[in-house]
Image (cartoon, rainbow, N blue to C red):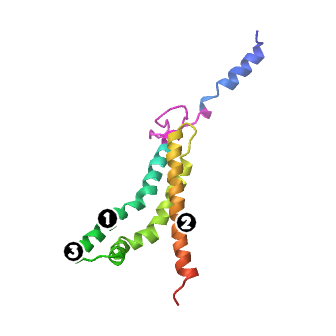
Amino acid sequence: MLSESSARYTNAVSDPPASNTPTHSAAGATVCAACGQRVLSDDDRKRKRFFWGLALAWLPLIPLPVGLANALRGISAQKATGLGAVAGGIAEMGAFYVLALAPILTISAMVLLLRSLSKAHPLRNILAVISVCWGALMISVLALFFWLVYVKFPQH
């Protein structure tokens, strides 16, 4: 049997005063008591980071089919053959996009995907790791390109 002082102590520990209760409860509450706005849980935040990271990771592949279609259209219109005809069409598929925007999007995607990792979602983790590895490969190839063009074989 609990003594009166220990019972008072357990009640004081288990029932904190109302002034110390947080406004954003982590126990599944979806509305803030203070401001009335929707509060995202940690899982919701990680899911949102995952989807944004996934979109940003694979977004640099969008110009590829557009550029290839444009190159093939140019080849058929000019009746050109050979690698030079294909290379010209592929080169115009977005040099600015590939050289400037792709690294920024890829690094952002890698950060978002790494922050979205969770022990509760193993399939999401596998897809996130594959996307992060894809982004690392893209950044490595781009860095190799810049090193070859500007350091190893510069054109004076």
Closer to the chain start, of discs 3 and 2, is: 3
Label number found at residue 140: 2
In the rendered image of this protein, does residue 147 appear above or below residue 138?
below
Separation of marks 1 and 2 at Cα, in angstroms: 23 Å
Q: Amino acid at mark 2?
A: Ser
Residue at x 50% of width, y 43% of height = 124
Q: Tell me the crowding category of disc 1: few under 14, some 14 to 19, or many 20 or more residues within 10 angstroms, Cα based.
A: few
Residue at x 78% of width, y 12% of height = 3
Q: Tell me the crowding category of disc 3: few under 14, some 14 to 19, or many 20 or more residues within 10 angstroms, Cα based.
A: few
Q: Tell me the crowding category of disc 2: few under 14, some 14 to 19, or many 20 or more residues within 10 angstroms, Cα based.
A: few
Separation of marks 1 and 3 at Cα, in angstroms: 16 Å
Q: Amino acid at mark 1?
A: Val
Residue position marked by numbered label 3 in the rendering: 77
Q: Position of residue 144 (x, y in %)?
A: 55, 71
Q: Is residue 42 magenta?
A: yes
Cβ atoms under marks 1 and 2 closer than 8 Å: no
Residue at x 49% of width, y 65% of height = 103
Q: Nearer the viewer, residue 118 or 152?
A: 152
Q: Is residue 114 visible?
A: yes
What's drawn in magenta, residue-wise? 19-44
